[in-house]
Image (cartoon, rainbow, N blue to C red):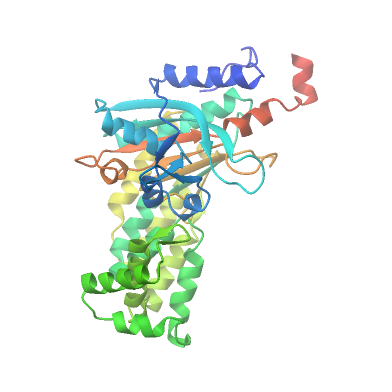
């Protein structure tokens, strides 16, 4: 997977490195696509999650329709696959600017990446993404990044196997990857001793009401108050949140036993093989069936080995997710082990429901990755260690 030791060192200027990266993707069978920069905002607001929606750059057209500068390129590529009726399987690469408010530094930065749609050999496609991410890091002179691995699909399978109310199941799955699960579990455990909610009157009025009538009531009240969005949420999303909260306030919370199973699951970490053994032991102890999801997990581990990924370098955590709502399976990030840069160098995962949520007639398997080329370039342009300089 990595270049031979005798191979020349890669070019060290950012433009040449980007060209080499795109060439690497094209050699792997991913044809380049360049989607527009300006897009309807609703797709990102609905699908990307609060971590991005709070940082989007929004505007409007002459008719008042909300638009945004693309905060990522996965959704624009997915929309293009649908609009252009690309034959499946489709393998697409990209390189260009994305726009997110970051607090520090420019809100415009460059990303490269690949998206694979329509492959049915799920585990092999997942492993290929991790290998392509490692190749991208190696191209920039980072041959052994830290590999963080998680699995949204496994957590979803666990939630389905547990006796949870639908509202709580949706809440926990939505908060996976948003760093809110500890708060969710703590809130549920404390619920019997909690004082009345700040919205107890409204929530009590909604309890047991017809869902559609309750949703219409909340929507009307917000509209009368002149509220259209709060924190990036639409009126419809605010109404849905009130209904979900009323269900939870009505007692649809966690039992002590179920909370303990979730806490034990979220504490599991290690190499993929170690984690698999611990998750199977937990499932057996709890009397729940996670065999299908864990078999998929183990097959992917086998393909990681086939793609020359060193499993001892992989750190799986059952609690690890990524803050994008459209992920549905494996997620991963590659980080600089020396901590010379903040945030991931490469990140990606599986999103099998994304195309259907964007309007495709059927669900289409999908998996992809994004490369923070400017972070990698900063590492590539840093002075070489003395031992490497002496060998040049």
User: Residue 237: which quarter of the image?
Assistant: bottom left
Residue drawn at (52%, 42%) of the image: 333
Image check: 251 left or right of 111? left
- The answer to whether any part of residue 327 appears in the image is no
Image check: 279 left or right of 2? left
Farthest front residue in view? 62
Q: Position of residue 184 (x, y in %)?
A: 46, 69
Q: Position of residue 69 (x, y in %)?
A: 47, 39
Residue drawn at (35%, 26%) of the image: 91
- The answer to whether any part of residue 362 appears in the image is yes
Q: Nearer the viewer, residue 307 or 247?
A: 247
Q: Position of residue 162 (x, y in %)?
A: 31, 67
Residue drawn at (28%, 67%) of the image: 166
Question: Relative to 105, is 227 above or below?
Answer: below
Number of labels in the image equals 0
Question: Relative to 90, is 323 above or below?
Answer: below
Q: Position of residue 223 (x, y in %)?
A: 35, 67
Q: Nearer the viewer, residue 87 or 278?
A: 87
Q: For the C terminus, which image quadrant? A: top right
Image check: 326 left or right of 177? left
Q: Nearer the viewer, residue 66 or 115?
A: 66
Q: Nearer the viewer, residue 241 or 324?
A: 241
Residue drawn at (60%, 36%) of the image: 145
């Amino acid at each position: 997977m990595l270049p031979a030791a005798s191979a020349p060192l890669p070019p060290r200027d950012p433009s040449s490195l980007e060209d080499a990266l795109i060439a690497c993707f094209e050699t792997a069978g991913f044809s380049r696509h360049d989607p527009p920069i300006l897009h309807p905002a609703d797709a990102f607001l609905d699908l990307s999650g609060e971590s991005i929606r709070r940082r989007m750059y929004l505007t409007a057209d002459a008719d008042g329709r909300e638009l945004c500068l693309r905060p990522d390129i996965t959704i624009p590529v997915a929309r293009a696959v649908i609009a252009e009726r690309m034959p499946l399987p489709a393998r697409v690469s990209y390189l260009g600017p994305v726009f997110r408010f970051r607090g520090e530094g420019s809100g415009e930065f460059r990303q490269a990446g690949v998206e694979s749609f329509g492959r049915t050999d799920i585990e092999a496609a997942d492993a290929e993404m991790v290998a392509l991410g490692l190749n991208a890091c190696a191209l920039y002179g980072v041959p052994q990044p830290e590999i963080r691995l998680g699995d949204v699909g496994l957590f979803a399978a666990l939630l389905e196997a547990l006796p949870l109310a639908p509202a709580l199941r949706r809440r926990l799955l939505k908060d996976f990857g948003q760093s809110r699960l500890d708060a969710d579990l703590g809130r549920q455990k404390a619920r019997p001793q909690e004082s009345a909610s700040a919205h107890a009157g409204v929530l009590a009025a909604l309890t047991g009401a017809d869902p559609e009538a309750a949703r219409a009531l909340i929507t009307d009240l917000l509209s009368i108050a002149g509220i259209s969005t709060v924190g990036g949420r639409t009126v419809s999303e605010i109404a849905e949140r009130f209904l979900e909260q009323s269900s939870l306030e009505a007692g649809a919370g966690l039992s002590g036993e179920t909370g303990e199973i979730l806490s034990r699951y979220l504490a599991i970490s290690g190499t993929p093989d170690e984690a698999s053994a611990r998750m199977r032991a937990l499932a057996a102890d709890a009397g729940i069936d996670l065999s299908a999801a864990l078999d998929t997990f183990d097959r992917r581990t086998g393909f990681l080995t086939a793609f020359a990924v060193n499993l001892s370098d992989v750190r799986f955590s059952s609690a690890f997710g990524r803050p994008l709502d459209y992920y549905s399976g494996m997620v991963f990030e590659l980080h600089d082990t020396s901590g010379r840069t903040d945030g991931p160098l490469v990140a990606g995962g599986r999103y099998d429901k994304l195309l259907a949520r964007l309007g495709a007639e059927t669900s289409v398997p999908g998996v992809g990755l994004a490369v923070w080329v400017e972070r990698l370039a900063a590492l590539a342009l840093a002075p070489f260690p003395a031992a490497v300089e002496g060998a040049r």
